[in-house]
Structures are given as structure tokens and as C-alpha cells.
Amino acid sequence: MAKSSKDKTDVDTQLILNELQKNANKSINEISIKLDFSRQKV
């Protein structure tokens, strides 16, 4: 994996974790729509 891809993945992971901490009661589908990610990525 290229370094830039790993950095992007780390940033995306942090965004997802932050959103889950703020809105733990929301569904994965709602969080993925809000972050504009696929459900598989979330």
C-alpha cells in the first residue's frame, strides 16, 4: 500500500470513529450517508 493511501485511510478511519462517538445511536447507513462513504467502508 502506498504511503498516501495509508494516510488517507487513517484520516477516514479517524472521521468514522469520531462520528460514531458523537452519534452512537445512529445506524451505519445514516453515518455513511453523512460522511459520504460507502456502507462497507464504515
Image (spheres, rainbow, N blue to C red):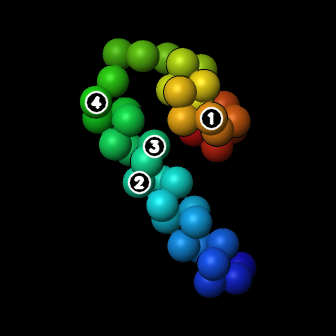
Q: Quadrant of the C terminus?
A: top right
Which residue appears farthest toward the left when viewing the image?
A: 22
State left or right for residue 37 relative to residue 25.
Answer: right
Q: Amino acid at mark 1?
A: Asp
Label 1's element?
loop
Q: Amino acid at mark 3?
A: Ile
Q: Residues within 10 Å of mark 2 (few under 14, many from 20)?
A: few
Q: Is 23 situated above or below 10? A: above
Instruction: Point out the tag, 2 or 1, that comes first from the N-terminus.
Output: 2
Label 3's element?
helix
Q: Amino acid at mark 4?
A: Lys
Foreground tag (2 vs 1):
1
- Residue 11 percent coordinates (x, y): 48, 61
Choose top left, top right, bottom left or bottom right for residue 9: bottom right
Q: Which residue is mark 4?
A: 22
Q: Quadrant of the N terminus?
A: bottom right
Q: Which residue is mark 2?
A: 14
What is the distance, in whole Å, between disc 2 and disc 3 at their CAs? 5 Å
| Number of residue marks | 4
User: Residue 16 bears which disc, if any?
Assistant: 3
Foreground tag (1 vs 4):
1
Q: Which residue is mark 1?
A: 36
Q: Residues within 10 Å of mark 1 (few under 14, many from 20)?
A: few
State left or right for residue 20 relative to residue 36.
Answer: left
Evaluate if marks 1 and 3 touch, with contact meaning CB atoms under 8 Å apart: no
- Residue 38 percent coordinates (x, y): 69, 36
